[in-house]
Image (tube, rainbow, N blue to C red):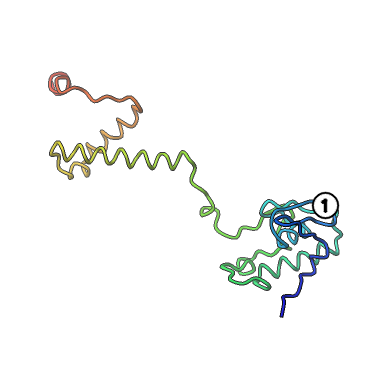
Amino acid sequence: MPRQKDQIWEHATNEGDRIRCNICQATFKGGITRIKYHLARITCNDVRPCPVVSDELCQIAKKAVEAIATGGKRKNRNFNLVEKGITPTSLHLTQAPSLVEPSSLKQKTLFAMTRKKEKEIADDALVKAMIICNILFNILRSEEFVAACAKIAEHGPGYVPPSSETARTKILA
C-alpha cells in the first residue's frame, strides 16, 4: 500500500531537487519538511518564513511540524523536541529550534585545524630531538622546561635558540 500524500503538498510543487511554495513562489532545496517550516513561519535550516501564508494554513503547518517533532511521521528520530520543551508554538517565529547543544554544533575552524597539525609537527620534532640528544622524557614534566617552552611561544615565530658558546659563556656566567 503506497504512503498517503501529505496534505501540505497541496501548497507546494516538486521541481526535481527543489520544492516551490505555491503561495509565495519561493523555492527551496529539499523536501516537504522545509515547506512545512516555511508555511509555519518558522525559520530553520535556511528556510525563510512565508510572508503571505494565511493564519489558518500557518496553524495547519505548525501542527505538521509538531508531528515531526514528536516523531509522528518520521522514522529513526534521535531526539524528541517536545521532551526538550520545544514546540513550534513555543518558538519565536524567526528563531530556529535548538535540536542539540550549541557547543556540539561548532565546527572547527581552518585555523584551529591548522594549529592542531602544527602542534603535532612541533611535538614530533621535539621528541626526535630529545631522542637524538639523549634527553630523558622526564624533562617534559619539569616546571622549568614547561616555563621555557611558554617563553619560546611568547617570542613567537623566528625564535632561534642560543648557540652553545652563548649558553656556556653569557647565559650561565
Pick out the residue farthest to the bottom.
1
Pick out the residue farthest to the front.
16
Secondary structure, mark 1, is loop
Q: Quadrant of the C terminus?
A: top left
Q: What residue do we see at 59% from left, 69% from top?
A: 77
Q: Give the residue at mark 1.
A: 25
Residue 66 horizontal/vertical position (percent) = 71, 68
Q: What residue do we see at 35% from left, 27% from top?
A: 157
Would you identify the image quadrant in which residue 3 lies?
Answer: bottom right
Label 1 neighbour load within 10 Å: few <14, some 14-19, many 20+: few
Position of 87 relative to 111 (above/below): below
In the image, 146 versus 159, the foreground residue is 159
Residue 152 horizontal/vertical position (percent) = 30, 30
Mark count = 1
The amino acid type of the residue labelled 1 equals Gln
Residue 119 horizontal/vertical position (percent) = 34, 40
Would you identify the image quadrant in which residue 1 lies?
Answer: bottom right
In the image, 68 versus 33, the foreground residue is 33
Position of 21 relative to 161 (above/below): below
Report the side of 98 relative to 39 (left or right).
Answer: left
Q: What residue do we see at 79% from left, 66% from top?
A: 8
